[in-house]
Image (spheres, helix red, strand yellow):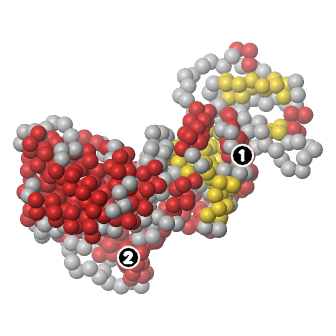
Amino acid sequence: MGESKKHEASRRLEAVEIKRLVEGVAVDVLLKNAGAHFEDIEPAGPVLQETVPKSATLQEQLDALFARAPEAKRVFDVFCRDLARDIGLDPDAVVLEHDDKTWRVHTEQQLESRLRARDRARDEFASDARRLIDVVRASIVVESEEDLDTLVEHLNEQYVAEEEQEEDEPASTSESKKMCRGKWTDVMCMDGVMCFFTDATTCFVPDHPVVKESYYVPSCFGATSKKDDDDDDDEYYVREDNARVVRFKNRFKHPLPDGSREMRYHIVMALSDGSRFVCELRVLLKQLIEKKSAKPKVDEGASFRPFFKRGGADLVEKIAKNRDVSDIARILKDALNGTDEDELEALADLFKHLGELNIVAVIRRRLVELAHAEDSDDSSKLGARLNGLASVLHDLGSLEEAKPLYERAIAIGEKSRRNRPNLAARLNNLGGLLQAEGDLAGAKPMFERAIAITEKSLGSDHPNLAKGLNNLAALLQAEGNLRAAKPLYERAISIGDRRLNIDHPDQVTRLNNFALLLWQMGRIKEAIPYQERATKIREVRGETDLAVEYRGELDGLKAGRTYPYPDPYRTGF
């Protein structure tokens, strides 16, 4: 690499608002390992409120949901308070007063309003209120990484159900007790009466009037609750079997699109009538709440995830200690002159998400040079590096320079029987470039091959397949083949609904693409719900420019206007 390129990178670096970078990420650097080592817990299928009837109107579903929500909130708040005490924390202790809100170790939250729940069920879940699993919610706020680890370890050890083998019911109980499904797990004595509990869906409770008055024993998880007649309030004694974690999303390891980091549990609580209710627990770290209002313009979710993977947080920590622009420019210059590929990758990721693509291109060129020096001309590493450089050049609009790099990366990928998904990604990239150049005939086989490879290597329900389907649909739409594009968009959206977060940017783009296709086909009534959903997500994410654009398109749909985009490449993705 010539010296001029290195100096160009230094000059570009000085244009970055380094103070924002240093001060804005310093707290994150100190917390770079917080909670990131815990793995997600995902059920085999969607988590649903089972007390909400499937074959009912939305109004009837909401009636069933909100009939049990107040009791679920009482039981869940007691559970959260006990959880805090279990790890030695005072649930009422004030952790932080921030933005006119007091955060306690156990921070109660109001029930979601029925109106808001109705809108979300209609707009996000196709009017299926069973998927509203955060109507009852609460937060636990901790002050240290140690408390965070202790809390998560306790929850995962005590409340995550382990797979159990079938066991025969003890012969002595088979006739004298109601038949239970599952494994007998506990026996306890209440007022001298022996009661058997199971972690399945039914349990036996003796017909005893004293027991009935003083206790309830839900038919799920063997939970018990006792009412103290000397107290004005109901005091719930929540056994461990009363609650089960059914889903855990570690947003420290996989941040939300807006960069938010938290633990998010979905926990099934047993109620007094034996029904079960899914509640949401958010586990927050004090320092990240403090930082939220002064958040930098860096997409933390995107910027920091690569550092967790490659150890690049050490690099950011080094940058954070140097508040002088010239010192930070020297760090970049030293990296470009060196051979530490992990450091260069981390720098490329950081500056990409800062929007400094010219610096990224310089770094990517250096990584290609190192791959050439280390490996043969057809190594998998070289193929990945060429694709990375081509991608940033593509983003910069240097299509002529990017095209042969994509082609060479694809040729290398063709020789390998491994990493077929990577080959599919490169084919998608080249297809997008060709479509941008107006070469629809050349782009089409790229997208078709990418779809075939992805489906064969990753399966028919993988998010990467949705990308290829969307790309091919957009091309067919650009060709004017609207009827062929429609089922591809529908399949891409269906995969995204099952496999991605509801506000994932790729999925929002597809919703908008499909709405525009339907508009172009003259099917305005069908288009409106998709555009409403996309618009609402853009607004919630705070993406003002796109939200305004989407809102304008939605207004045009509702007004019955003619499809406004003659440009055939308007919907490409």
Q: Residues within 10 Å of mark 2 (few under 14, many from 20)?
A: few
- Looking at the picture, how far across and down is residue 10, in whole percent? 21, 63
Q: Nearer the viewer, mark 2 or mark 1?
A: 1
Closer to the camera in the image, 436 or 30? 30
- Asked whether, in this view, residue 3 is left or right of residue 329, the answer is left
Q: Residue 321: tell me if it is visible.
A: yes
* Image quadrant containing the N terminus: bottom left
Point out which mark residue 545 bears. 2
Can you tell which mark lies on residue 552? none
Label 2 secondary element: helix
Task: Tell me the amino acid under the disc marked 2.
Answer: Asp
Q: Residue furthest top?
A: 171
Q: Residue at x 32, y 84 (%)?
A: 562
Amino acid type at circle 1 is Asp
Mark 1 Cα-neighbour bin, 10 Å: few <14, some 14–19, many ≥20: some
Relative to 408, is 543 on the left or the right?
Answer: right
Q: Considering only order in the chain, which callout, 1 or 2, is on the residue closer to the N terminus?
A: 1
Q: Say which of 309 and 335 sits in front.
A: 335
Q: Nearer the viewer, residue 553 or 310?
A: 310
Within the image, what quadrant is residue 174 found in?
top right
Mark 2 → mark 1, Cα distance in angstroms: 44 Å
Image height check: is 484 above or below 304? below
From this viewpoint, is residue 48 visible? Answer: no
Q: Is residue 546 above or below residue 19?
A: below
Q: Residue 355 lies in what quarter of the image?
A: bottom left
Residue 152 percent across, percent down from the top left: 56, 40
- Name the residue tied to disc 1: 90
Residue drawn at x 13%, y 66% is 398
